[in-house]
Amino acid sequence: MKILPPIVLDGQMRPVVSAVAIEPETVDDPHIQACMAYWTDAKGDAFAPSWANFHLHELPARVLPYALVLDVTGDPAEFTYRYWGSGHTHYHRRDYTGKKLTDMADAWSATLLTRQYMAVFEVRRPLVFLNTYEGVEEPLRSLRMPLSEDGHTITQMFAFVGRRGVTETLKNLFTPSPDYNG
């Protein structure tokens, strides 16, 4: 497994214990591999596929609840959730569709995710992040992939978060929404 430079955690990221970026092809997860295969086919000779050529319904059905699509705008980059899979609502206890990443209720989560999306923005290729949390037995595997409408600029990001081996303990790390009934 090729390990990329870790995201630096400054002690202010509780409950995150560690976040390490690795190459997607080194991850033994059929859903991550299905997303990677689809992304690779959709991009053709480009560095990344366009959102117009990336059709969520062509991914395995089990991926969709844990998929995310973010629009990337501005300089510095700002991320807005275009698609928020329903499985994320179960853990975050909120639906962030149409909201900016910086609007997340838990600042530690927004900071971690921003760092991960910026890492993909810089390397311009997919990465998997192994995120280890306090009290959660397995690292969360988070695939982040660039999309580009013009073939040069990253205009969207696709993400899939593998929840294999992750229990309800993860749900308790997020601030509940007063109007969430799940």
Image (cartoon, rainbow, N blue to C red):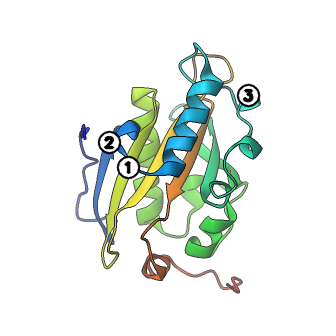
Where 10 falls versus 94 (above or below)? above
Which secondary structure, mark 3? helix
- Is disc 1 in contact with disc 2, using a CB cutoff of under 8 Å? yes
Q: The N terminus lies in which quarter of the figure?
A: top left
131 and 62: which one is in front? 62
First reached walking from the N terminus: tag 3 or tag 2: 2
In three-dimensional space, the C-alpha distance between marks 3 and 1, rounded to whole angstroms, equals: 25 Å
What residue is disc 3 on?
A: 53
Question: Residue 29 location, x and y as percent?
Answer: 45, 51
Question: Residue 155 location, x and y as percent?
Answer: 63, 30
144 and 60: which one is in front? 60
Which secondary structure, mark 1? strand
Residue that protrudes farthest toward the top in the picture? 45
- Tell me, for residue 22, which label it has, or none: 2
Question: Residue 77 location, x and y as percent?
Answer: 53, 36
On the question of residue 74 being in view, the answer is: no
Q: Give the amino acid at mark 1.
A: Phe
Q: Is residue 95 left or right of residue 129?
A: right
What residue is disc 1 on?
A: 129
First reached walking from the N terminus: tag 1 or tag 2: 2
